[in-house]
Amino acid sequence: MYVHGEAWTIKELFVLPNEYIYWSIQIVMYPFMTGLVAGAFVLSSLYHVFGIKQLKEMARFALVFSFALLPVAMLPLQMHLQQPQRGIEVFMTPHFTSAIAAFGIVFSTYGAIVASEIWFVYRKHLVRTALALRNRANKRISEKIQSLIFNALTLGVYDISERALHQDEKAVKVLAGIGIPVACFLHGYAGFIFGSVKANALWMTPLMPVIFIMSAIVSGIALCMLTYIVVMEIRKFLAARKNAARLTHQTKEEIKGIEINVIKMTAKYLLFFLIFAISLELLDLIFRGYTAVKTWDILRSVIYGKDFTDIFILQYGVGNLLPFILFLLPGLTVRRTLIGVILVLFGVFMMRWNVVIGGQSFSLTFAGFMHYHLPIIPDSIETFKEGLFGALLVFATPFVLFWILNKVFPVFGIEESH
Amino acid sequence: MITRRKFLKNTIAGIAGLALPAAGAEIVSPRKLFAARNDTISGPNVRWAFLVDTYKCVGCGLCVKACKLENEVPYDANVTRTWVERYVLTKDGRIHADSPKGARDGFTTSKIDLGEGRFHDIKKEDIDKAFFVPKLCNQCENPPCVQVCPVGATYQTADGVVLVDRKWCIGCGYCIMACPYGVRFFHPVYHVAEKCTFCYHRITKGLKTACVQACPFGARMVGNIKDPNDPVSRIIRTERVSVLKDEYGTRPQVYYLGISREVI
Ligand code: SF4
Ligand code: SF4
């Protein structure tokens, strides 16, 4: 027998008996992960829809990564449920006055769009690989399985004539076009889940969905850049080794050239969306202070007092201002970018933290506070799921998925896809 | 090409299929099922309401104790369906308030509980006024907790009481977040959302709620607001009563006599 929330909540002054921090680290992870999904997709669409050529390298990469992130957007929600085995009810008996109920529909629509877009992008590659494998004589077991997978993935369509490929390209464009509003919806709607809780003085603002979308795009771009840099470094390392040379057609210097160009281009978009995100957040803050309604007293003591370090030092300072300067200083290098994007990711994470945990750090009485202590060493399933290791598990999953997906949809080294 | 078009079509059909079961959920709305039962006091002429006379409350906590036992909320768990708050207003204009253990054991000391094991002692001569306020679920006419439940596990009965279906709640906690009165929590044994039900199992059989029955001073009353002769209904109509946090638009149905503006 345990009271949910008691393990990590410390109450100070006048707090109601049933108040605890009910939404903990996994609910911080939920908007953080969906944000990455949406952001990565928007980044890939910039190329497909608006034809921003410089993003070509990044676009394919971002698309596959967004797909790898997708299941992980659901994982934290599932992990925070008290009755995880009943989670499926949200799909089976959605109660549509609830913001969470639409999750199933929005999520599966989005998933279908990303999946079909990937399919069109990789169709030529899939067909070629499938045919090559099929025609190979004396197949080993592993090749047989591979052949089965690739042939299944073609969905029985083997037409890769000029005309068909042209049609594919069109389909990709349309899907990417529809995908942008859907991705924004997927995430803006995560913002709505919080923004519409009228009982919570910090959450309730119509700006919440927009703020969430902007910071989502920022984080998505940052994560793509981070992974891109890491992957490119590995490839450089491989290219440098003679025996690995045949794995790639490029030399180390060539890779380096492409890398810094792509990074510089993407960094511009990152900055652009970062400015948007910060402006909106500051607008919200200034508006609250200026209108100073009844709840402002307690909010002020949270924002400028209890959570000052989390909000102003870690989120705005380390997470926003510092990377901003790093990106703007002339002569951007890969290493500086790497530090920059890690800080940006951290900043967006802190923003989610300050919304979710910050929103529960004061009592409904407006006269008391609650402090959250993240469980580190788990002593029960509860403190594992809603503790440091649960969060790390959620964060690590997309990378594993990406690694697996990359085997079927190689992000680098094929010229087939556009 | 046709194959591909088919593929897209199937995808769309698949998504539409996911939405279909929602229609099924409408047909067996628990609210309608409850309304259809006729062995209980409910139906169009009943709307349960509660009246708290704060002048009469002495903060003994017998109601909290009775509620925990009646509704099987573990006695020592730090959650409770109903609780009593103490407000002490001092001459320097400050408000001191607390509710240690929800006042399960009453207020045994004049020291104010500040949490984290700290206490604040107030001298008698510094006090302007002091009083107790019992709290419970307001069985809101427009309940945000019902609105936000993603699976419809929490619902409002035809006679106005908001209940939770323990077999259907997924334990997402959204309703807990949405209630402006902090009355909801997770049941320590069943791990689903839990709240005050006005002792629905009792009132629908003509009994009083456990807390009303336990209060030796008559500070709590439950009644049918639609019955003009009901004492609760009469007091609400003829005397000056107020409700809590009106500004949230929840239309709460727990009425208070003698509440002060400091009470939130
Ligand atoms: S007081 Fe809270 S739990 Fe009770 S009906 Fe109103 S919103 Fe729901
Ligand atoms: S905790 Fe249960 S009753 Fe509350 S919103 Fe979630 S599913 Fe509904």
Image (tube, coloured by chain):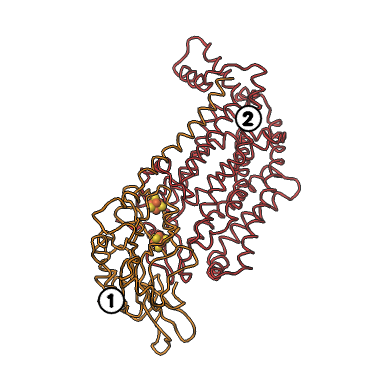
Chain colours: A red, B orange
Q: Secondary structure at mark 1?
A: loop
SS for tag 2? helix
Q: Residue B110 lies in what quarter of the image?
A: bottom left
Residue A216 in picture, x, y percent from top left: 59, 47
The answer to whether residue B134 is above or below residue B36 is below
Q: How many dots with numbers? A: 2
Residue bearing the label numbered 1: B218
Chain of the residue under the numbered disc 2 shown in the image: A
Q: Is residue A27 above or below residue B65?
A: above
Q: Nearer the viewer, mark 1 or mark 2?
A: 1
> Which residue is located at x 54 percent, y 59 percent?
A204
Q: Give the amino acid type for the residue marked by disc 2 in the picture.
A: Val
In the image, taking residue A12 as reference, residue A219 lies left or right, namely right
Near-viewer residue (B39 or A257)? B39
- Residue found farthest to the top: A137
**Is the C terminus of chain A in the top left, top right, bottom left or bottom right quadrant?**
top right
Q: Is residue B59 visible?
A: yes
Q: Residue B186: horizontal and vertical position, in percent?
A: 35, 56
Q: Quadrant of the N terminus of chain A?
A: bottom left
Asked whether the residues under marks 1 and 2 belong to the same chain, the reply is no
Q: Residue at x 40, y 47 (%)?
A: B151
